[in-house]
Amino acid sequence: MPERRALAVLLLTLALGGGVWAQDRASAPPPVTPTAHEQAGRCVEGIEQTCMDLVRRSKDGQERRIMVIRTGSDDSTGIYTLCTPQEDEPEDAPNVGVFSESGAGGIRIIIDKNLIQAPLAMVTQQSAEGDQEGSDGKVEASSGTARFLDEVPEGQIDRLSRCGVAVERQPRPGTVQVTQGKTRLTGQTLDYDGADGIARIAGPITFQRDDQADPLSGESKNIEINVDTEATLLVGDVVLRSKGGRVSKAGRVEYDDQANTARLYATPEQPAESVRGGDVLRITDGVIVYNLEKNEVYANAGEGGNISGEFLDEAAPYIAP
């Protein structure tokens, strides 16, 4: 088959074709049943599961909530406690909530469209300002355990020890699970900080999107969830592999399961590319948009960016007028 090459200035579209599955498919996650708190969109008093929520007021004036829920209620599988300021601390010192749950449901953390599950979570909630309802803070989650101490140790100055709680974080790959629609990702720690409104999930990250037509798998170094913009980013050496044989790579990928899109961001230092067999789309500035439903990719170059394509197909590639 003769080789065809093309350079596009603004837009180039590639059709996704057949190929060999790059790696074994991971088993699909079990169906997720929303808790009563999730259905209400906030923590509700009187509901069995223990819950705390952080309230973030972003620059656009919107109020966004982060919920942390213990799914179990048996003392043998975990604990929940709210450690309030001690007598010698300022009245406006933050509250600290400790959640642990070794049961199948674990601790559930709801951030935007992401359901995150882990065995252990600690929530630091700042005191509310004025007559505002709720406040922002921090969330730390990972594998690990928490337990009540039989006796409060003397001479301790840290808040948890003085509250009679012992916490042991034990980060391990794959123990922080993220579900977004059809997509499941795993990492080893989650750290959300209200100072910048970003939840960071440390990797190694594994990626699996179940789809009857063309499942995806892949990996990245980290995940960033921007609460203000409601964007989920895969960060660092991102690789997405389709059953159809397409391999896409970038330094940063904005992923939206509901919209069926992955946006691969390119820089001169780390170009973005999508390859299927002998067909290659590569850019050094701008974004490659991967339509997960239609199995197509197209590129928008930034100012001064280059788009290049290499094709081993009878049909010439589509180039926008």
Image (cartoon, rainbow, N blue to C red):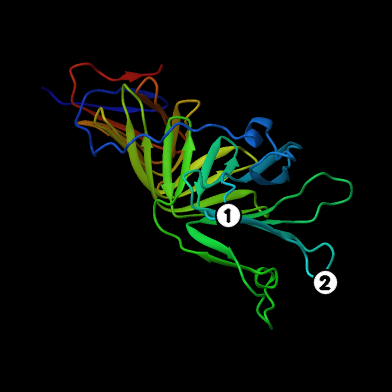
In-front residue for pair 308/161: 161
| Mark 2 crowd level (few <14, some 14–19, many ≥20, 10 Å Cα) | few
N-term mark: 1 or 2: 1
Q: How far from the left and from the top, in percent, is residue 226? A: 59, 44
At label 2, the amino acid type is Glu
Q: Viewer-nearest of labels 1 and 2?
A: 1
Give the vertical position of 202 relative to 259 (above or below). Answer: below
Residue visible at 36% across and 45% down?
219
| Mark 1 crowd level (few <14, some 14–19, many ≥20, 10 Å Cα) | few
Q: Which residue is mark 1?
A: 75
Residue visible at 64% across and 30% down?
39
Q: How far from the left and from the top, in percent, is residue 161? A: 65, 72
Residue 142: tell me if it is visible. Answer: yes
Which residue is at the far right?
Answer: 131
Q: Which residue is mark 2?
A: 87
Q: How far from the left and from the top, in percent, is residue 208? A: 36, 37
Q: How far from the left and from the top, in percent, is residue 87? A: 82, 71
Residue visible at 56% across and 34% down?
113
Name the image quarter holding residue 246. top left
Give the structural element (helix, strand or loop) at label 1: loop
At label 1, the amino acid type is Asp
Residue 162 badge: none
Contact between marks 1 and 2 (CB within 8 A): the answer is no
